[in-house]
Image (cartoon, rainbow, N blue to C red):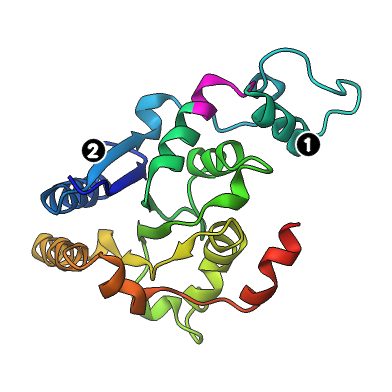
Amino acid sequence: SSGKKGIYIYILSCSFNAAAKEVAVEILSAQGWTVEVSELYALKFEATVTTQDIIGEVKNADHFRYAEETKLAWEAGKLSDDITGEQRELTEANLIIIQFPMYWFTVPAIMKGWMDRVLTLGYAYSQEKRSMLSFTTGSHESMFSANGINGDINVTLWPLQNGILHYCGFQVLGPQIFWALSHIPTEARGTMLEGWRKRLQVVEPQVCCSLELHFPGNENRDLWMQ
């Protein structure tokens, strides 16, 4: 291994998303990556932010402010074990792939909970590594166009790709989208997985930099984070 490490966050083992995960683990491992997988349902990952995310006393129990309290807990090494474990994997990774079925134009609740709890204030803003959304939809690509019923897919993904990933410092690679899974034949799903397989074979930085997304305000980000 050349020290390349990826972390694959996904939902459920009996789904097309799981098949996409299996392809990614196979291809990346063959290229010398060490791939850690977090299957959130299997982990029974808690989606809700609570005081239980902090070990011991909080600073202000009467006026509990989650962001401030978890920042202090992160600095003191007092975050709950599940958060600490996920942060450890994320810190060691060079690439994070977030695999999910799109629910109501965003990630499922358990995955949003992962983002809310793992990307704690302070820790979150140091993620100088690559990230990618890979997801399935119930709609055809034409429905996610500027004139489609769902609107432009880039607008749909803006909160996730810019508001969370880019904001936290990730280099955001273009998304992998598996369109209209429930409306296509089995052979077409196989073709989609083959396309995913081919894309992952060129995931190295010097090749995929052209797939990196660019967001306005890059030059001011460091000032905002101070």
Q: What residue type is labelled 1?
A: Glu
185 left or right, relative to 93: left
Tell me the CA gap for discs 1 and 2.
38 Å
Instruction: Give the labeled residue for mark 1.
Output: 68
Q: Which amino acid does label 2 sit on?
A: Cys
- Magenta range: 78-84
Instruction: Determine the residue positioned at 50% across, 85% down.
Output: 146
Instruction: Determine the residue positioned at 75% across, 63% down.
Output: 224
User: Which quadrant holds residue 141?
Assistant: bottom left
Instruction: Give the labeled residue for mark 2.
Output: 14
**Would you place residue 163 above or below residue 36 in this image?**
below
Given residues 73 and 118, the one toward you in this image is 73
* Tally of numbered tags: 2
Other-residue count near label 2 (Cα within 10 Å), few / some / many at <14 / 14–19 / ≥20: few
Instruction: Determine the residue positioned at 44% across, 41% down.
Output: 90
157 left or right, relative to 74: left
Q: Is mark 1 on a helix, strand or loop?
A: helix
Find residue 167 and report its horizontal and vertical position in percent. Answer: 61, 61
105 left or right, relative to 6: right
Q: Is 83 in the magenta?
A: yes
